[in-house]
Image: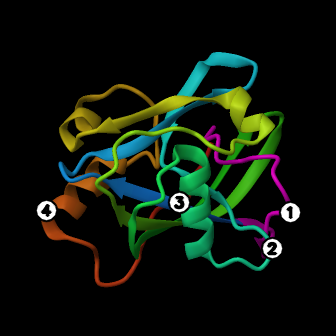
Amino acid sequence: MPAEATDAGPDTYEGGLRKVARVVLLDPEDRILLLHGHEPDDRADDWWFTPGGGVEGDETREQAALRELAEETGITDVDLGPVLWRRRCSFPFAGRRWDQDEWYYLARTTVTATRATALTELERRSVAGARWWTCQELTRSHETVYPTRLAELLGRLLDDGPPARPVTLDTEIV
């Protein structure tokens, strides 16, 4: 499942759930940046996901979102906005089960070139690249994307703007 689960540093846990900050990064054309991940030993078991990862130590989720975005994409020139969505998920990845509490932050950037600058060893084995997607491309795609309703959520975000308060998404257990 999503390669946001990494072997880097001591992640912060709350109530048995790994605290995760994710980024819904949009460019000036309202395209969203997704990373292409796969099981470390099986490139055919693949999916797309938003940048982000575990909160480390005493950092805030906002700090984690910006750090993860920089490490995974090289993009640091962003305007970090509000939390759009919250989701709990559980999935197998790299031989173990990951139980996460994810917060998805809206961010905007004019930078579209990506370059991973600080991937962990596990991420180097499981992240195959990045791609900017239009909402229409996501809607038409048969690729696996997390969260599973991302095309619908992105369409609503682009049509209506950010929600007044974070929307709690359905729990996803794989």
As shown in the figure, which amino acid type bears the numbered disc 4?
A: Asp
- Residue 7 falls within the magenta-colored stretch: yes
> Which residue shows up at 81% across the image and 69% down it?
16
Question: What residue did someone put label 2 on?
Answer: 57
Q: Are marks 1 and 2 in contact (CB under 8 Å)?
A: yes
Distance of label 4 from label 3 (alpha carbons): 21 Å
Of mark 1 and mark 3, the one earlier in the sequence is: 1
As shown in the figure, which amino acid type bears the numbered disc 3?
A: Arg
Mark 3 is surrounded, within 10 Å at the Cα level, by few (under 14), some (14 to 19) or many (20 or more) other residues, namely: many
- Stretch of the chain drawn in magenta: 1-18
In the image, is residue 25 above or below residue 16?
above
> Which residue shows up at 44% across the image and 68% down it?
105
Question: What residue did someone put label 4 on?
Answer: 159
Provide the major secondary structure of the magenta segment: loop
Q: Which image quadrant: the N terminus?
A: top right
Of mark 4 and mark 3, the one earlier in the sequence is: 3
Q: Helix, strand, or loop for circle 2?
A: loop
> Which residue shows up at 56% across the image and 54% down it?
70
